[in-house]
Amino acid sequence: MERVRVLFLCVQNSARSQMAEGLLRSMGGGAIDVKSAGLQAGGLRPEAVAVMHELGLDISKQRSKSVDEVAAERFDVVVTTCEEAKEACPFLPGARETFHWDLPDPAAVPGDEAARLEAFREVRDELWTYVADLIRVLDPVQTFASRKR
C-alpha cells in the first residue's frame, strides 16, 4: 500500500514546520511520508533542534526548503502551521486534505536564550498534540480513496 504523503508549510521552514516534520516522522512509525517547506527557505533554527533533542528526536539533518523545491511533488495532506503560510499557500495539485494550525512563531519571541527555548518548547508541545490528532485522522491503514468526501 502506498504511504500517505504529508507536507507541513510555514513561512521560513525554520522551526514550526521542521518540528512538525520530525514529530510526524517519529510518531508515524514509517507509515507516513513527510516533508516540510516554507514560502522561503530560512535555515533550521538551533532552538528547534535543541528542544526536539529533549524528546530524543534528531532533526539536525533536516534542511530548510522553499515550497518551490517540493511544488512538483504530490501530497495527500498539506498542513499550514501559521497564518502567513495559510494566506500565501500556493495551490498544490493532488492535495486531498488541508489543515491549518495557527501557531505562534517561537523565533519571534524577544528575550534571552532561556525565554526563546521556552517559546520553542511550548510550540513543540502544541505540535505534539496536533500531530497525534493528525495521525488518528489519517489512519494509514485506510486509504484516502476509500474515504467519503
Image (cartoon, rainbow, N blue to C red):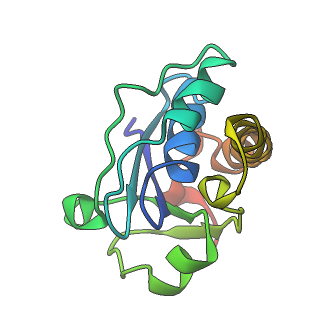
Residue 71 appears left or right of 29: left
Q: Quadrant of the C terminus?
A: bottom right
Whole-percent x and y of residue 81? 60, 63
Relative to the observer, which residue lies in front, 49 or 112?
Answer: 112
Q: Position of residue 96 (x, y in %)?
A: 48, 69
Looking at the image, residue 35 sits to the left or right of residue 113; the answer is left
Q: Is residue 33 above or below residue 103?
A: above
Residue 22 vs residue 32, the one in the foreground: 22
Of 134 and 128, the residue lying toward us: 128
Taking the spot 69% from the left edge, 19% from the top edge, the residue there is: 55
Q: Residue at x 63, y 48 (%)?
A: 138
Q: Is residue 61 left or right of residue 51?
A: left
Q: In the rendered image of this protein, does residue 21 appear above or below residue 68? A: above
Total labels drawn: 0
Q: State the image quarter where residue 102 is shown.
A: bottom right
Q: Position of residue 147 (x, y in %)?
A: 61, 61
98 left or right of 36 in image = right
Residue 63 at what x, y percent from top left?
A: 31, 40
| Image quadrant assignment for residue 116 | top right
The answer to whether residue 32 is above or below residue 82 is above
Residue at point 48%, 42% (across, down)? 45
Quadrant of the frame with the N terminus:
top left
Nearer to us in this view, 145 or 84: 84
